[in-house]
Amino acid sequence: MPKRCTLGVDIGTSSSKGVLVAADGAILATASVAHEVQRPQAGMVEMDGRIWWHEFAELSRRLLAEASALGVEVELAGVGVSGMGPCVLLADDDDEPVRPAILYGVDTRAAAQIEWMSQQLGIDEITRVGGSTLTSQAGGPKIRWVADEEPEAFARARRLFMPASWLARKLTGAYVLDHQSASQVSPLYDIEAEAWHEPWWGRFAGGIEAPRLVWAGDIVGAVTDEASAVCGIPAGTPVIAGTIDAWSEAVSVGAHGSGDLMLMYGTTMFLIATGDETLRTPSMWTTVGAFEGTRNLAGGLATSGALTAWLKGLTAADYPTLLAEAAESGVGARGLVMLPYFAGERTPILDPDARGVVAGLTLSHTRGDLYRAALEATALGVRHNVETMRAAGADIRRIVAVGGGTQGALWLQIVSDVTGLEQEVPQTTIGASYGAAFLAATATADVAPPSIADWNPVASTIRPRPEVAADYDVLFERYLRLYAATAGLVHELAQVQREAGESDNDHESAPDHDNVHDHDSAHDHDSADDHDNDRQEDAR
């Protein structure tokens, strides 16, 4: 008897990943394919968007073939898609890209356009309409950059895509964009109206047709005969719109309800807090949620797993050894405070010229102390984001932890201790592709839609230890003072590094999360969705 399944594919920064999932949430097959971004100049990160469709086709054929090899007869009920973002892929009348896709906040080329648009429109008005100030994460200035710097390409541009919407177009012919992704094309989207802001779209994206807006789980069409011949998915299979990878990952673990905070452990850290109201703060990203009626505050650390990986390489020690030594070091790393800003920092300080600092070093400190300080530094960065979100009005009641870094018990415990929040760790942390498959299963359910609690139950809960709370309160206050006291000097050093040819932008990553390290083993792990999404700069 055929097994009813859905297929999910996520396009990440360094790889694309796919999963074939049964109606009860069981994973039948997984596949991935690696790729690279291009960096034509310092601060520029882009990718040939045509790769996204080629890799989707490869993954879908591999997933179906793997199921067949296992003797599973598949009844494919639907297809889900997601991808890094916000990205800007401009295409012509024939859906041919006019230039490579410009990636999310890791690409900082549009600094001049951000400044000019902010002056033209006014920061207060931009925030009122779009929810957030303009940063390297915003899609609108990237579109304007193409118009300013590559006018011939812009003159041919007729459509705007991101990875998920590009796949939906290739599979079904639908030209759509989900609301969550659209809300990151700042300032061209009106967050309260949940619609394109037509005056600014016409002014800054003139000549480009605005994609029809839908929600992430909406069915936008069916696989065409032409697409079926390429990817092997039966013609007529429903396809959902999908969304940006970090939000799809939040769906995969049920972290999209009011009061939820998804914390993605990866090469970077990415955070998404969900609520019912639009909250605005200049140091975080305000977006529409994946589902109608929800709003998000999002943020991210520029380094987390990347920092611990750097220390591993520097010390030539394996992770089990470093973890054991870090555990022995204890709370406060024997008098060390570290700022984790080794690739600048995203939220809440929004400082690309921030740099890593280690204060309190003596000749008696060990590599275990440094490793403990690095783990605590990322946890302190998470707390800084959480407290900034709360100050803006966010009601954060629980953390759901995702990503490859959730394999590390010590890291998880330190984050809970520093923030004072429980963390739920789900059974499956495969990532955004799993969330896309779940959205497709929900959209195509014959009777009652599936529950993510049934698909992906909580495997463990990490609780903060009250006996260390006071020590970490003191450490957090020192962490904040250390940045304030050293910012001027490290900005000077960042300029020295630029003059010496060192591009910090080349090391930034966002939501999405690339190679994540398992801090309880000697092996490296890919993050749940790649993101990046790296993401991620970021949401990715």
Image: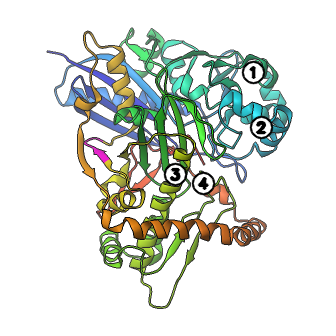
The residue at which mark 1 appears reads as 201
Locate residue 305: give its quadrant.
bottom left
Which mark's residue is nearer the viewer, 3 or 4? 3
* Structural distance between the alpha carbons of marks 3 and 4: 23 Å
Residue 426 colored magenta? yes
Three-letter code for the amino acid on which mark 1 is drawn: Trp
Q: Regarding mark 2 in the picture, which secondary structure is present there?
A: helix
The residue at which mark 2 appears reads as 123
Task: Establish if 278 lies above or below 238.
Answer: below
Which mark's residue is nearer the viewer, 2 or 3? 3
Image quadrant holding the C terminus, namely: top right
Three-letter code for the amino acid on which mark 4 is drawn: Glu
Give the x, y percent position of residue 57. 43, 27
* Structural distance between the alpha carbons of marks 1 and 3: 34 Å
Question: Pointer 2 and pointer 3: residues touching (CB < 8 Å)?
Answer: no
Task: Establish if 486 lies above or below 405.
Answer: below
The residue at which mark 4 appears reads as 508
Q: Regarding mark 3 in the picture, which secondary structure is present there?
A: helix
* Structural distance between the alpha carbons of marks 2 and 3: 24 Å
Q: Regarding mark 4 in the picture, which secondary structure is present there?
A: loop
Between residue 191 and residue 470, name the one nearer to us: 470
Question: Pointer 1 and pointer 3: residues touching (CB < 8 Å)?
Answer: no
